[in-house]
Image: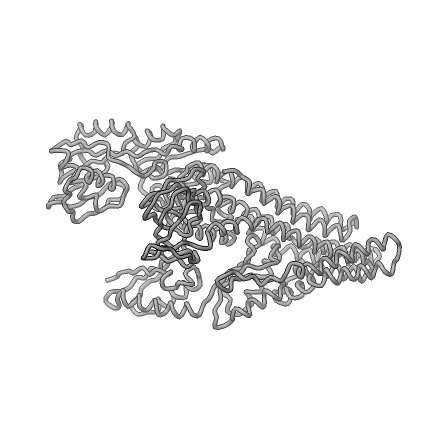
């Protein structure tokens, strides 16, 4: 017999649960175990193992997994390091390639947008010192938390900028001397400027080539400066390195502006918390020291340090930092609260339900940081182009020099023109044009309570032509209540008691409504056996030895005319109806209604104003009820009576007819349709981490109006990225055209290259200001 066991990777690999290679290594080890038939990932943090019960047991597999997991845990490591100097796409590519050349490095991913590098490695082949040595060789300063406090290893600012300041001073001195025609001394001043500002650039260029065999922008600028000096153009050579160094500093400043959005998310969580002791006193402890089950005291005006549930007191809590809601939300005993939100005027006691590294705000920060690994199509295209562009232009510069020499141009002039072409051969502005825009958009969206999982999802939002919305729990509040109990045989109490007996074994919102109605009336509900869910149709079970069925019309072959009349009337009132039968006799009808969200009509109107071609209601409910709900909110296209797999088929049909489709659901019951859509949007993600993991976009609150904001942001991002790419390519082509006839200079080419990088960065930063 075949059984399966699900193993939580967070427990088996507590420090490496997100390490793809570590999870795969553990899975491979389990596959080698006798009796194990298949191993695969089931969700983000679960490993599912299928095994033969005649050969092994679940306990044996779990025990083996922990032993193998301990081995993986000790052998494989992963770390995210914040580094200085990671301000251009070329830098990131060089860093990744250099790290991947180290034996044992499984994955290396550098992000210009967030200024960090994520590394996974096998400690049997390489240690962390060797990894940091590569970073230092390439001129990057690591800022890694080394103790309870974050201790940056960054030298003082004056130490970092001293060579640049001296170089600028020497360059200005050279310009002043050149105006006074003191030729020997101006050359000395320019040479000092080249040495001071250019030495760090040359060192990085040489180390990058040694480590990755790539000609980086640092190497190209060094070659250009040395070439200019050899030709006697000391002023041009000094201008190249000084302007480039200034441009680098300005790029770093601009990128720090973009990264500030991510850092400000991290800063939402306070450093300390007031933990309650058994004797009623409090102690101040680091927020990261809180454990599940601890109770903390939150005073008025304080930020809540961890996710939890209120166990005493009541207060209005400002949830805007997490959900983007403009008004505070009243919280009392039993209500959930999230880390990073701000307590109002009341004092509340909160029991911790999630550790700090799994809190809602931690998940938001992690998703924003990891967004760069889910690259937009335009970014992947640019990366492929950039990988070929620089070598091609370097070859082009050599060919240009040879051709100009062959046509009789003086060697000095031919070399200068070739050096200009060389200077503009690094596509820094082009490579950075997409990631800075994506980061700005995603971090800005996070502050409005919208989580967008990477550039791919962001660009897909900008292409959406159709929005499909699920009804229960999305368009409605997902809190249905029984409104009508109509017995056709017997009395209403018996009808409700039998229905509640079977529905008590179901987690469906409609089932919970029936059970709640029986509890409110104080009915004694008998137990049910052999309960079976019939997906999309209803549920069946055995109560007191007789079969009870509850469900839609499709569950029954013969329905009395009187029942049909009741069904029509109730469904026209936008109520969901359920027929209840005992054996072959229909006993009656139970009707349930759900409240339509107050902002639903406004949200649908906003989608129409955006130019969305079709807003479609997808539901498993009956046609009449679905159309009644749709009419109230302004939706004119209804697809009703759909099973979960039929919703996926409906999404595919909409895509074939109109183009890109966004599917909006609860992120749990609509998983197939969310996965099928071009963009899956999950509602109410602040309350469930499963919703965050399931969809491409997660709305932290239940505000449907955020859908229009997400689509508007996606469109703005696509326009910005396209403008940045066109501008970056246009500048390169223009200066190539100017370089060949000798109509530009080295310093102008450097200025154009740095200027383009700064302009595309500034343009990308504008996406933070798109309004929610």
Task: Evaluate whether residue 651 shows in this view.
Answer: no
Q: Residue at x 61, y 47 (%)?
A: 761
Q: Total number of numbered labels?
A: 0
Residue 316 appears in the picture as rendered: yes
Residue 349 against residue 658 in the figure, above or below: below
Q: Quadrant of the N terminus?
A: bottom left
> Given the current orientation, which residue lies at the most extreme bottom position?
124
274, 460: nearer the viewer: 274
| Residue 206 location (% of width, % of height) | 67, 65
Residue 247 falls left or right of residue 34: right
Q: Residue furthest right?
A: 181
Residue 260, horizontal then vertical, whole percent: 55, 50
Q: Where is residue 766 shown, x and y percent of the image?
A: 58, 42
Residue 591 horizontal side relative to residue 722, left or right? left
Q: What colour scheme does the image use?
A: one colour
Closer to us: 222 or 313: 313
| Most foreground residue, 683 or 188 | 188
Q: Residue at x 32, y 35 (%)?
A: 640
Residue name at image x 51 percent, y 71 percent: 126
Asked if residue 462 is positioned above or below residue 242 in the image, the reply reads above
In the image, residue 674 lies at what x, y percent?
39, 45
Which image quadrant for residue 213?
A: bottom right
Left or right of residue 79, residue 514 in this image: left
Q: Indicate left or right for 564 with 336 as reference.
A: left
């Amino acid at each position: 017999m075949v059984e399966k066991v699900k193993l939580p990777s967070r427990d088996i690999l507590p420090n490496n649960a997100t390490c793809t290679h570590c999870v795969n290594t553990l899975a491979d080890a389990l596959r080698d175990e006798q009796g194990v038939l298949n191993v695969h990932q089931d969700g983000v943090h679960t490993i599912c193992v299928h095994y033969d019960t005649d050969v092994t047991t679940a306990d044996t597999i779990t025990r083996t997994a922990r032993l193998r997991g301990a081995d993986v845990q000790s052998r494989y490591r992963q770390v995210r390091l914040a580094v200085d100097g990671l301000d251009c796409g070329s830098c990131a590519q060089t860093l990744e390639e250099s790290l991947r050349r180290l034996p044992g490095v499984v994955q290396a991913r550098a992000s210009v947008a967030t200024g960090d590098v994520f590394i996974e490695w096998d400690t049997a082949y390489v240690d962390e010192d060797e990894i940091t040595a590569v970073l230092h060789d390439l001129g990057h300063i690591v800022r890694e938390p080394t103790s309870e406090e974050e201790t940056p290893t960054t030298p003082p600012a004056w130490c970092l900028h001293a060579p640049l300041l001296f170089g600028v001073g020497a360059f200005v001195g050279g310009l002043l001397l050149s105006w006074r025609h003191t030729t020997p001394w101006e050359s000395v001043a320019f040479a000092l400027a080249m040495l001071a500002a250019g030495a760090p650039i040359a060192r990085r260029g040489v180390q990058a080539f040694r480590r990755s065999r790539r000609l980086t922008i640092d190497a190209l600028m060094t070659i250009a400066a040395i070439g200019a000096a050899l030709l006697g153009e000391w002023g041009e050579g000094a201008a190249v390195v000084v302007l480039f160094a200034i441009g680098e500093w300005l790029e770093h400043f601009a990128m720090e502006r973009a990264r500030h959005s991510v850092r400000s998310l991290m800063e939402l969580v306070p450093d300390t918390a007031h933990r309650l002791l058994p004797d009623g006193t409090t102690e101040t402890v680091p927020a990261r020291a809180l454990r599940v089950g601890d109770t903390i005291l939150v005073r008025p005006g304080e930020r809540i340090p961890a996710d939890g549930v209120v166990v005493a007191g009541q207060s209005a809590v400002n949830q805007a930092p997490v959900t983007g809601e403009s008004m505070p939300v009243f919280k009392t005993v039993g209500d959930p609260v999230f880390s990073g939100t701000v307590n109002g005027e009341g004092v509340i006691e909160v029991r911790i339900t999630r550790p700090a590294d799994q809190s809602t705000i931690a998940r938001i920060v992690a998703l924003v940081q990891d967004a760069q690994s889910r690259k937009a199509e335009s970014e992947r295209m640019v990366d492929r182009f950039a990988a070929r562009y620089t070598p091609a232009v370097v070859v082009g510069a050599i060919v240009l020099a040879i051709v100009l020499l062959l046509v009789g141009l003086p060697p000095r002039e031919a070399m200068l023109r070739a050096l200009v072409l060389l200077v503009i051969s690094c596509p820094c502005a082009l490579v950075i044009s997409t990631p800075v825009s994506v980061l700005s958009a995603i971090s800005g969206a996070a502050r409005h309570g919208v989580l967008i999982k990477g550039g791919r999802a962001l660009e897909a939002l900008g292409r959406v032509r159709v929005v499909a919305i699920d009804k229960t729990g999305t368009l409605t509040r997902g809190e249905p209540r029984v409104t009508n109990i109509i017995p056709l045989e017997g009395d209403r109490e018996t009808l409700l008691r039998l229905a509640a007996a079977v529905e008590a074994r179901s987690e469906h919102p409609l089932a919970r409504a029936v059970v709640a109605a029986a509890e409110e009336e104080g009915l004694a509900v008998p137990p049910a056996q052999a309960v079976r869910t019939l997906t999309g149709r209803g549920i069946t079970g055995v109560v007191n030895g007789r079969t009870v069925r509850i469900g839609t019309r499709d569950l029954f072959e013969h329905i009395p005319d009187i029942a049909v009349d009741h069904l029509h009337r109730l469904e026209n009132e936008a109520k969901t109806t359920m027929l209840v039968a005992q054996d072959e006799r229909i006993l009656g009808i139970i009707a349930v209604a759900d409240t339509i969200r107050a902002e639903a009509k406004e949200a649908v109107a906003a989608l129409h104003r955006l130019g969305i071609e079709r807003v479609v209601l997808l539901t498993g409910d009956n046609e009449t009820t679905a159309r009644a709900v749709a009419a109230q909110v302004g939706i004119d296209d209804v697809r009703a009576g759909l099973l979960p797999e039929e919703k996926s088929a409906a999404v595919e049909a909409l895509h074939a007819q109109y183009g890109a489709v966004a599917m909006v659901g609860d992120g749990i019951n609509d998983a197939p349709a969310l996965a099928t859509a071009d963009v899956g949007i999950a509602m109410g993600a602040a309350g469930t981490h499963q919703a965050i993991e399931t969809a491409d976009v997660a709305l932290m609150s239940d505000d449907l109006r955020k859908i229009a904001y997400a689509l508007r942001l996606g469109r703005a991002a696509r326009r910005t990225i396209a403008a940045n790419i066109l501008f970056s390519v246009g500048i390169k082509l223009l200066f190539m055209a100017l370089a060949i006839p000798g109509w530009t200079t080295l310093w102008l080419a450097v200025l154009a290259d740095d200027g383009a990088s700064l302009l595309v960065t500034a343009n990308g930063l504008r996406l933070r200001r798109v309004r929610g």
